[in-house]
Structure formats: structure tokens, C-alpha cells
Image (cartoon, rainbow, N blue to C red):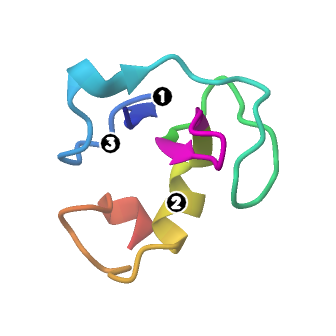
Amino acid sequence: MSGWFGKSWGAPVCDEDDHFATPVGAPCERCKKPIQADDQGIIMPLADVNRSVLLLAYHLQCYLDGIICPGCPRCRPEKFN
């Protein structure tokens, strides 16, 4: 159950069926700064040792910084390249 939040950036991941409400106030898992109402980002599941699933939020830029193909025009909007 992964998805995205905020305004669409036109990537294939931005399917309306996978759109989440912006998790305002939740910490970004990469930078630990709180998610703001106008942020864009990714929601990713994490299964813990107790077999429960946590949904982790990432700012879009923080998530993209962890992707190996930083210049990928399909995944990254032009403003991030």
C-alpha cells in the first residue's frame, strides 16, 4: 500500500488511486523535518518484526535523493534535475 501525497508532479507513480492525504506534521523518514501542508511526497510501507505495517512519509526531494538514477526524466520532474 504505497502512494503519494501533495500535488501531482506528473510521474507514473501519481495515479489518482494511490493518492494519500498529506500527512501534515509527520516527520520525513529521511530528513526528519515535519511534512507541511503544501509538500509533495511518497508514502512507503515498512513491515516490522511484529508483522505490523507502518506507513512512512518522505518529502519528494528526500525520496528522490535516495534513488540511484538522479537524472531520470521519467521519475523526476525537470525542476529536480
Element under disc 2: helix
Structural distance between the alpha carbons of marks 3 and 2: 14 Å
Q: Which numbered marker is on residue 9?
A: 3
Upstream in the sequence, badge 3 or badge 2? 3
Quadrant in which the N terminus is drawn: top left
Q: Nearer the viewer, mark 3 or mark 2?
A: 2
Residue 15 coordinates in the image, percent (x, y): 20, 30
Count of numbered tags: 3
Query: In x, y percent, where is residue 34?
Result: 80, 38
Of the numbered discs in the image, which one, if any, rests on residue 45? none
Mark 1, secondary structure of its residue: loop
Residue type at mark 2: give it.
Tyr
State the residue position of label 2: 63
Considering only vertical position in the picture, is 20 above or below 53?
above
Relative to 7, say whether 17 is above or below.
Answer: above
Say which mark, if any, is on residue 6. 1
